[in-house]
Amino acid sequence: LQAYYAAGGSVAQDGVAIHTYFGKDPTNAMPIISATRALMNQYGLGSEPLWVTEGNWGTSGLTDAQKAAFVAQEYVTLWSQNIPRFYWYTWDISDQFGGLTNASSGASTGEAINAAGITYGILQSWLVGSASPPTSPCSQATDLTWSCGLTLANVTPGEIMWNANATTTKIVSGAFSTYETAASGISSSVIGNSVTVGNMPMLLMTTQVTTLPSVAMTAPTASSTVSGTIS
């Protein structure tokens, strides 16, 4: 991209698109996004959109639970980086390479949604209509736990947490009374201001978020991670 810009290509574009195939850890995309935006700013393109037009877990050999956690981490990571559009690849191919159903390649939609697809639907209720702080909402603690603050669609505070390296107990704000994981969306009470954090992201909240009753997987169209349908 830098060579393209140096050759004069920056005058003939309306935005930039990247893919996010960076192994088993979706947060590896953060420095790539920062470097891409720095390059765009260098050539006077800072106001143009940066989209992620393709991404998934690839052929990383993940378990079903790890794939579901990857979906959650990927979407929250890109949301935290103010990526306005992210296109998951792909909906209906096989669960080896990003599939959110148990379908085979080329099959019609409507097959059984797998664990990653269930997580996708839960994320919709977390992120659509939410708002993040003006600066990056996510930070990583010394024990490698990620924490991402947000204001939920019901205008209450929330915090998304995960640790891809270990299962650990974290002390949380007394303002949070319940939590749910991106695996099930089932609400549980926070006991003693502490929660057990692992690879699957969890959402801490003051009131229970209403998870949408179904996963709308029949319209893989343009979307927004903040104010529209995630796709």
Image: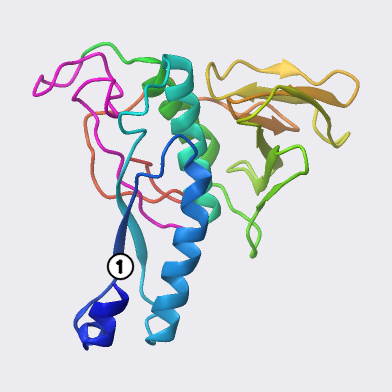
Using the rendered view, name the quadrant where residue 180 is placed. top right
Relative to 19, say whether 183 is above or below: above
Residue 104 in the image: x percent, y percent? 15, 16
Task: Give the residue at x 76% y 44%.
Answer: 141
x 10%, y 19%: residue = 107
The residue range painted magenta reads: 83-110
Q: Is residue 124 left or right of residue 60?
A: right
Q: Is residue 226 visible?
A: no
Q: Residue at x 41, y 15 (%)?
A: 64
Which of the 4 image quadrants contains residue 21? top left
Q: Amino acid at mark 1?
A: Val
Q: Which residue corresponds to mark 1?
A: 16
* Extreme-left residue of the structure: 106
206 vs 128, left or right, is right
Quarter of the figure that contains the N terminus: bottom left
Residue under the point 58% across and 43% down: 153
Q: Secondary structure at mark 1?
A: strand
**In what quadrant of the picture does the C terminus appear?**
top left
Query: Residue 142: horizontal and vertical position, in percent?
Result: 78, 43
134 or 10: nearer the viewer: 10
Q: Position of residue 176 (x, y in %)?
A: 80, 32
